[in-house]
């Protein structure tokens, strides 16, 4: 104890705490306390305007519970499960975008003139994130006059295909794929591609030469040399993708679809927003947020335990 | 003699075969190069097409947009769309708000993150590593969890619709601290040791040695933070009510509510909100790309 105190009192320790202080205060006020407050809020019923009422686990029961209705078991909040489904459906885009980013990175991984220009162009979509891009894609996905259906229409008539064009954001079945297409376009040249490119450049040339001597073809070399060597990067991208995937879709829903049609593009994040700021169900919104937190934590833990075994360091 | 001839012939054969193989390899290299360029161009074009469509739409006559035939070059070119869009909402004010908030958040994050990162990377004090681990763990907390209490706090302090609400929560970043700490760890210690012997204070070491040596990492954090703040949507949406306090994304969203199907104006407005990010990216893209790779280094 004495040792501990004298250490704290030493010049370097005092300086250390002082250097951390500004950041730590922000961390305390805007991250740590909110997490605790949020947990407390999940046990109350509160509309901000009247005093909060303690309701125990009622929010979680309303969110996750089931009840019997005319002999059938139904969820207390069926919409919540629907939105979980939407969120998971959107997350199917994670492996698709990863594969796309890897392909682009492999094409980029050649010593060619002008590669920097291509890198800049590929990166551009992921830079232009935000409301402006959502508006652009809302226009591109317009069923009657949008660019995508105009191109599709031209292709269809070229091959004499007699099919209706997708209604994209106006059709519950096509709205999610439409938004995922936008995500794919923004993702394959962006951050993950750069990470993959760096990983590919780290694969030792000797390994490929050795594989060639052993008579491996291109496909075999990819699976036996490239994939194991870049597996730490794949692991990192996948974990970050899943953490972000669970909390995504708010802006797209807000700007492009208002969560529709028929709730087809409402994700958990948008549902939390609506509960908190549109309907002022602060307690219920906090309960959903905490449920999301726990899910993310558990999934990341599982990824870490089991995914880690597939990674070759 | 005969032996020598034999050797000479086989050498000739060998070199002919060698040249042939090299020619084949060169031909194959050229094919691969050509295919690669074709692939790169196809990807590049599909990346650019939506953005060019935005530009094309923004310069068309309102009626020309609703036609079933694809028209890439507007005829006539309507520059007036930009003037009209700019004047339809106080976009000048939104711009100023976005620039001011972005600059403050960026300066704040670079200062607070670099100070904390210096302490985590170089100074010895009890609880350091536990605290650093706690920082790392917070990166997993969804924004939705912290945002509701943050909003309640801002409301309690009567900060709704003020710059305080827009700026203060953005001044601190676990990610920035993490990234800079990783970079500081890679710097050689010799200079610091020498400065210490010369009687330089710890703050002096941070300010005169660590910071100047870390310009690339600081430029990375600056670029990333500014662009993140520029595109930030949910938080400014929640804490602003009046038109004067809106940032660009929120203003653009309000603009959409006003002109929901006037695509020429919407695309013009979208384009001029994107312009600054594109400029910042082009200026700092080297740092941006390096920073992404830096953030991924674990340990």
Image (cartoon, coloured by chain):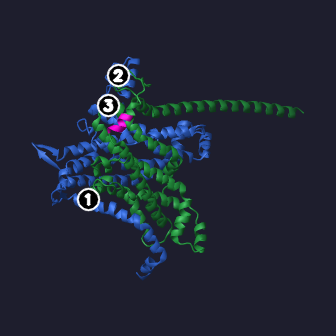
Chain colours: A blue, B green
* Image spot of residue B229 (x, y percent): 39, 50
* Image spot of residue A280 (x, y percent): 20, 51
Local SS, label 2: loop
Residue at the far left: name it: A70
Query: Who comes first in sequence, dot 3 or dot 1?
Result: 1
* Span colored in magenta: B83-88
In this image, B193 relative to B46: left or right?
right
Identify the main secondary structure in magenta. helix
Discs 2, 3 touching: Cβ within 8 Å: no
Front residue (pair A113, A223): A113
| Residue of label 1 | B158
Residue A217 sits in quarter: top right
Residue B230 in view in this figure: yes
Protein chain holding label 2:
B
Q: Decide whether residue B85 is among the magenta residues.
A: yes
| Residue of label 3 | B262
| Residue of label 2 | B67
Number of other residues with Cα within 10 Å of mark 1, as a class: few under 14, some 14 to 19, many 20 or more: few
Please identify, in this view, whether the residue under mark 1 or under mark 2 is nearer the observer: 1
In this image, A64 relative to B179: left or right?
left
> For the N terminus of chain A, which image quadrant?
bottom left
Residue at the far bottom: name it: A2
Residue A181 in view in this figure: no
Q: CA distance from mark 2 to mark 3?
A: 14 Å
Q: Are marks 1 and 2 on the same chain?
A: yes
Please identify, in this view, whether the residue under mark 2 or under mark 3 is nearer the observer: 3
């Amino acid at each position: 104890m004495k040792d501990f105190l004298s250490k704290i009192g030493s010049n370097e320790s005092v300086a250390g705490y002082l250097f951390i202080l500004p950041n730590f205060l922000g961390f305390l006020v805007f991250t740590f306390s909110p997490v605790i407050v949020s947990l407390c809020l999940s046990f109350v019923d509160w509309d901000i305007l009247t005093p909060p009422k303690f309701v125990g686990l009622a929010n979680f029961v309303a969110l996750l519970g089931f009840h019997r209705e005319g002999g059938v078991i139904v969820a207390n909040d069926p919409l919540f499960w629907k939105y979980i489904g939407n969120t998971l459906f959107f997350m199917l885009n994670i492996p698709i975008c990863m594969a796309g980013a890897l392909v682009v990175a492999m094409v980029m991984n050649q010593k060619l003139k002008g590669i920097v220009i291509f890198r800049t162009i590929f990166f551009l979509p992921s830079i232009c994130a935000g409301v402006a891009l959502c508006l652009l894609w809302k226009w591109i996905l317009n069923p009657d006059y949008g660019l995508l259906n105009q191109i599709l229409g031209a292709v269809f008539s070229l091959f004499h295909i007699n099919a209706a064009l997708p209604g994209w954001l106006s059709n519950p079945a096509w709205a999610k794929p439409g938004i995922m297409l936008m995500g794919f376009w923004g993702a394959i040249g962006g951050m993950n591609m750069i990470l993959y490119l760096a990983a590919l450049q780290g694969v030792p040339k000797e390994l490929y030469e050795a594989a060639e001597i052993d008579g491996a073809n291109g496909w075999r070399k990819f699976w036996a040399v490239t994939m194991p060597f870049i597996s730490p990067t794949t692991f990192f991208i996948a974990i970050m993708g899943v953490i972000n995937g669970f909390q995504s879709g708010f802006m797209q829903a807000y700007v492009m679809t208002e969560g529709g049609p028929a709730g087809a593009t409402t994700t958990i994040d948008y549902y939390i927003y609506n509960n908190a700021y549109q309907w002022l169900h602060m307690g219920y919104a906090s309960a959903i947020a905490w449920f999301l937190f726990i899910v993310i934590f558990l999934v990341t833990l599982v990824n870490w335990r089991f995914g880690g075994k597939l990674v070759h360091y | 003699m005969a032996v020598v001839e034999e050797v000479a012939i086989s050498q000739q054969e060998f070199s002919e075969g060698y040249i042939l193989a090299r020619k084949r390899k060169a031909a194959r290299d050229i094919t691969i190069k050509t295919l690669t360029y074709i692939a790169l161009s196809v990807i590049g074009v599909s990346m650019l097409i939506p953005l060019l469509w935005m530009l094309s739409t923004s310069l068309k006559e309102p009626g020309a947009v609703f036609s079933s035939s694809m028209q890439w070059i507007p005829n006539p070119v309507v520059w007036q769309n930009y003037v009209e869009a700019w004047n339809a909402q106080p976009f000048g004010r939104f711009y100023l708000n976005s620039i001011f908030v972005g600059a403050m958040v960026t300066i704040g994050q670079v200062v607070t993150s670099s100070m904390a990162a210096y302490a985590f990377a170089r100074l010895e004090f009890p609880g350091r590593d536990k605290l650093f681990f706690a920082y790392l763990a917070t990166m997993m907390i969804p924004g939705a969890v912290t945002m509701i209490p943050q909003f309640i706090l801002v409301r309690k302090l009567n900060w709704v619709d003020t710059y305080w609400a827009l700026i203060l929560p953005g001044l601190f970043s676990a990610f920035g601290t993490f990234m800079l700490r990783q970079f500081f760890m890679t710097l050689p210690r010799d200079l610091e040791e020498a400065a210490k012997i010369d009687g330089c204070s710890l703050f002096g070491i941070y300010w005169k040695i660590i910071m100047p040596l870390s310009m690339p990492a600081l430029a990375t954090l600056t670029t990333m933070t500014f662009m993140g703040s520029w595109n930030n949507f949910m938080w400014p949406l929640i804490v602003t009510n009046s038109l004067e306090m809106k940032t660009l994304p929120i203003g653009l969203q309000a603009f959409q509510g006003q002109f929901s199907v006037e695509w020429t104006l919407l695309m013009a407005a979208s384009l001029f909100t994107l312009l600054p990010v594109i400029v910042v990216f082009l200026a700092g893209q080297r740092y941006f790309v390096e920073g992404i790779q830096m953030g991924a280094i674990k340990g």
